[in-house]
Image: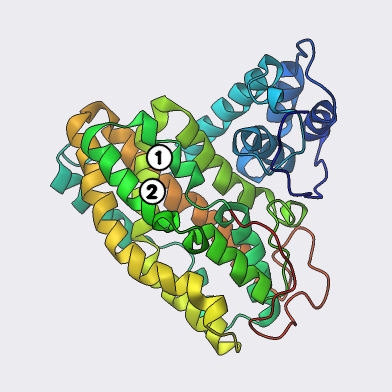
């Protein structure tokens, strides 16, 4: 076995394709295995790929080979032809579905100022579900724990999907991306990495901060949000989309994080739990300006052919996160769990600020 940063996640297959992938990854890489027919069958069977458990878990596993800390397997599987071919087939269908269902805004001129203005208009007009307002005013401790479980799929690897774009950019856009990502990674201080701070928030609610621990618990749409970022970041041709996604992500972060912090404080949690959200209120107010003008705007100015993808990436961020947020709100307002597999009772009942699990959050 090659070196691994596996953290003992305990997730199960959700269909024939993810089952076959997990079976393969328990073995040593060998001769090519043709998974394309199974991938095609899975795509054809799915009513909506974004909500299909087998499709999204399969993509999560395949992208996870590039991140590590997802599946305990031989590192040689990362670029094995048997897995790259079905990944390309799945992400091609996933991208096509997104392009068919994400409402596209009118394209601005390909100047830095025009693109930044268009992005601020787009994110300011977003009418998606306000999960943050619900958390601030109504969420129970049990719902706060569920919220963190949903968020953990991305946030315990915060910034990593966008960082794939750094070598795919150049000039002003690259410099802007690096400036933003440096803050996300704590400016060289590992204890201030946003993923590590979020791990502390999870521990404060009695949750396990090991990456992958709660994959079984979240629905396909939660996996789809991270899978979309991974797809944008790992494909050079989609570098415009990942830049637009990061811009929208930063532009819609500061105010919601303030509301999330309010909800946790309302439930009796202190600064050791709210630190993650408080940090983003200030940091993302700065990041949104850099992301809108210096990253997305400069990229459009330097490479006008990427303008449509920049706006698509921003719109996709709002749309898919809106779908995920709506799923949570629909469940909570119906008095139900928003998780695919509910948490064991008592996960959120530890003393506010208590630490009950250990492990790396990065």
Mark 2: give few (<14), some (14-19) or many (20+) Cα within 10 Å: many
Against 27, is 7 above or below? below
- What residue occupies the far top of the structure in this picture? 31
- Horizontal side of 151 relative to 122 (left or right) equals right
Q: Residue 194, relative to residue 294: is it above or below?
A: below
| Whole-percent x, y for residue 314 in the image | 37, 47
- Across and down, in percent, residue 305 comes to 25, 26
Find residue 169 and report its horizontal and vertical position in percent: 32, 32
**Considering the image in quadrants, where does the N terminus appear?**
top right
- Pointer 1 with pointer 2, Cβ within 8 A: yes
Q: How is the image coloured?
A: rainbow
The residues bearing labels 1 and 2 have C-alpha atoms spaced at a distance of 6 Å
Badge 1 element: helix
Is residue 76 something that shows in the picture? yes
Residue 1 lies, with reference to residue 204, above or below; the image says: above
Q: Nearer the viewer, residue 52 or 189?
A: 189
Residue 165, quarter of picture: top left
Identity of the residue drawn at 60% across and 39% down: 67
Give the left or right position of residue 235, taking residue 342 as reference: left
The dot on residue 242 is 1
Q: What numbered label is drawn on residue 246?
A: 2
In which quadrant of the rendered view does residue 124 lie? bottom left
Q: Quadrant of residue 312?
A: top left
Which of 242 and 8 lies nearest the eye of the viewer?
8
């Amino acid at each position: 076995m090659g070196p691994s940063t596996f953290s003992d996640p305990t997730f199960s297959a959700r269909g024939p394709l993810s089952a076959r992938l997990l079976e393969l990854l328990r073995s040593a890489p060998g001769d090519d295995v043709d998974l394309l027919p199974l991938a095609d069958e899975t795509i054809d069977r799915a009513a909506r790929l974004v909500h299909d458990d087998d499709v999204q878990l399969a993509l999560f596993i395949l992208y996870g080979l590039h991140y590590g800390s997802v599946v305990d397997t031989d590192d040689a599987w990362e670029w094995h032809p048997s897995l790259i071919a079905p990944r390309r087939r799945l992400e091609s269908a996933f991208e096509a579905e997104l392009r068919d269902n994400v409402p596209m805004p009118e394209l601005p001129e390909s100047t830095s100022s025009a693109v930044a203005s268009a992005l601020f208009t787009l994110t300011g007009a977003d009418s998606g579900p306000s999960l943050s307002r619900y958390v601030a005013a109504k969420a129970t401790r049990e719902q706060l724990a569920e919220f963190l479980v949903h968020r953990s799929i991305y946030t315990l690897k915060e910034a990593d999907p966008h960082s794939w774009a750094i070598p795919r950019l150049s000039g002003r856009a690259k410099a802007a991306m690096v400036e933003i990502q440096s803050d996300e990674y704590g400016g060289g201080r590992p204890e201030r990495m946003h993923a590590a701070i979020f791990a502390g928030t999870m521990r404060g609610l009695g949750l396990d901060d090991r990456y992958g621990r709660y994959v079984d618990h979240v629905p396909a749409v939660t996996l789809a949000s991270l899978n979309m970022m991974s797809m944008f970041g790992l494909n050079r041709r989609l570098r415009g989309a990942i830049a637009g996604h990061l811009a929208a992500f930063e532009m819609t972060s500061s105010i919601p994080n303030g509301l999330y912090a309010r909800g946790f404080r309302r439930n009796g949690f202190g600064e050791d739990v709210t630190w993650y959200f408080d940090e983003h209120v200030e940091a993302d107010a700065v990041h949104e300006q850099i992301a809108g003008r210096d990253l997305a705007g400069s990229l459009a100015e330097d490479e006008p052919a990427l303008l449509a993808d920049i706006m698509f990436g921003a719109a996709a961020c709002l749309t898919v996160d809106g779908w995920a947020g709506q799923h949570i709100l629909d469940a909570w307002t119906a008095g139900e769990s928003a998780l695919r597999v509910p948490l064991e009772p008592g996960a959120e009942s530890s003393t506010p600020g208590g630490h009950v699990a250990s492990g790396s959050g990065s």
